[in-house]
Amino acid sequence: MDVQVFTRDDVRHLLKMPRAIELMRDAFAALSAGRIESPIRTTLTNDHGTVLYKPAWSAAQSLFCAKVVSVFPGNADKELPVTPGIIVLNDGQTGMPVGLLEAGFLTSLRTGAATGLATDLLAKPNASTAALFGTGGQAWHQLEAMLCVRELKRVYVFSGHEENAVRFSEEMSDLIKGCELLPAPNRDVLTECDIITTATTSPNPVFSDQEIGDAVHINAIGSLGPLRSEIPPATILRATVIVDQREAGLREAGELLPLMEDGRLPPDFAPAELGELVLNKDYSAERPVTVFKSAGNAVQDLVCAAEVLKLAEDAGRGQTVQF
Amino acid sequence: MDVQVFTRDDVRHLLKMPRAIELMRDAFAALSAGRIESPIRTTLTNDHGTVLYKPAWSAAQSLFCAKVVSVFPGNADKELPVTPGIIVLNDGQTGMPVGLLEAGFLTSLRTGAATGLATDLLAKPNASTAALFGTGGQAWHQLEAMLCVRELKRVYVFSGHEENAVRFSEEMSDLIKGCELLPAPNRDVLTECDIITTATTSPNPVFSDQEIGDAVHINAIGSLGPLRSEIPPATILRATVIVDQREAGLREAGELLPLMEDGRLPPDFAPAELGELVLNKDYSAERPVTVFKSAGNAVQDLVCAAEVLKLAEDAGRGQTVQF
């Protein structure tokens, strides 16, 4: 049994952000249209961390995809990745395992790509200023995605640790063109921002509702879990909220669940899905503040992994491993 | 990220049936004692087949294990394995992927090993004659397991296709010593059998209750699903039934579910688990006919895969693949 193996470098080489954003368009449309099956993930937890098993099936790609990804916060101290993972691809015609991919880079890329799609669909066409909260593993791809879909002139970087914002801005400035990347000098600049992206591990809101402007698009892709919320309730309540998948969003997002439980959001609260926006060409958000809350979906991994498999053939990347 | 890869040959070389049966003893005891977590498997199905995702966690081995196994009956016509699969192992301390194993050989071995354990615990100590129904992918390890735990003088091979019974008996006779392996000449020989093992894909009983003796141990490891039953209801009703895991057994076994639904078995029917027999040294079956019905459990994969990982280090087997 021969299986193609793709390293982190293979994935990085083969799949770029603009293409990943295109893929998200099709993926989320397929998810909302019920053309992709992605059952609830299984989790196993011990004292050190959690391993998540996220399977999905898509007829369009004729592939089964399962991401096995661990979340072990203590790994940071051991110089190991905090969220190491592997993706297993099985052929739709034969069920044979056909691909194994390093999952860390792909996860970060596809999470950025979802932000790119949401920003493209919801931010002002002439958006010029953005804020990025968080300088961790997701930050670069979040930044890259925003820059892919809007001609930003300036991005302010916020971090719980000032020195991280400085370091990130310095390091990443070399990688981007035509846009000024700088550590946020103060919180007043938030009112200038047309786009705010939060990619932190903070359990509490990273800004207050008074600090942001009257018309802004927010991508909230960080902290997940019913007791964690990067976005203040007051912002949620005055925004049009969009999720990647309704069921998961309402179950897992600490931005939404507590507000439904205490009655500030109606019990039948049903935010639109990102894919529904893609499918409905006439969509326009009701309110000037929009929040895209992402829980992450296995469909994102599936379409990106399928694309890697496809591109690798032409590019001659990947290694055949015999099982 | 470096991961150890083990081929089918590596697994075959490293793990032998006697050791696998020992491992099942510990594994099923741990499962029944609640020391192993193996949540309900996830399945994804298309027109061609099903992919099953079976995760488990064990503190004793400090490993997470997930088997991704496909069941694609049409593969037989394509000269491909009908149940190809891969096992993913993650370290309990760091969550890092540490091993990838070909799953087909291991699945067959561990399924045989469960039969070996059940037979050791339940068959007459002086059992000398057995019957094996089925000559497919599971048959050899079922035979090997019975021979590991009882000094059998004769094993009769039954198949829906007479020529398969002849071929299997001829081919496998060379591999075993001190035991006569022969295609069953007729069904009368079933009354002689102290042990009957069924490993078929038959949806219907492969023998009738009148055909078997008054004191016999039966291993039913084949057809699975609420509408499939290799064993006749009359046999189930006069037997002491043992399952690998109560919840899965009652949900998935066509030998049991319909009898509970139509009232022939009580609604609170609770067969003992194999691990409970291991834990209870004083156990003896109430009835002279015993049936071990196996649905297969992820714990079997976990303990075998963990052992392969351990033995490989000393033996210098396996290939390091960089992700």
Image: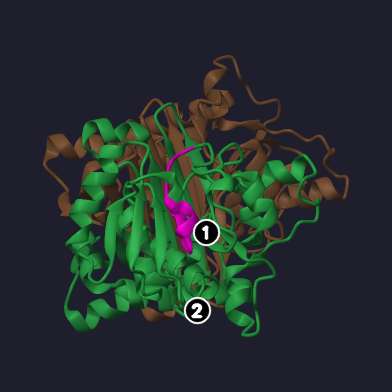
Chain colours: A green, B brown
Relative to residue A141, is residue B255 depicted above or below? above
Q: Quadrant of residue B215?
A: top right
Q: Position of residue A138 (x, y in %)?
A: 35, 53
Residue holding disc 2: A26
- Type of amino acid under label 1: Ile
Crowding near the residue tagged with mark 1, few <14, some 14–19, many ≥20 C-alpha atoms within 10 Å = many
Give the magenta part as a residue range.
A189-202
Tell me the element at label 2: helix
Q: Does the magenta segment cover residue B242?
A: no
- Chain bearing mark 2: A
Query: Quarter holding the N terminus of chain A?
Result: bottom left
- Chain bearing mark 1: A
Disc 1 or 2, which lies upstream in sequence? Answer: 2
Residue holding disc 1: A218
As drawn, is B217 to the left or to the right of B146? right
Q: Is residue B252 visible?
A: yes
Of residues A159 and A194, the one drawn nearer to the viewer in this rendering: A194
Q: Position of residue B261 (x, y in %)?
A: 84, 49
Of residues A110 and A263, the one drawn nearer to the viewer in this rendering: A263
As drawn, is A77 to the left or to the right of B216? left
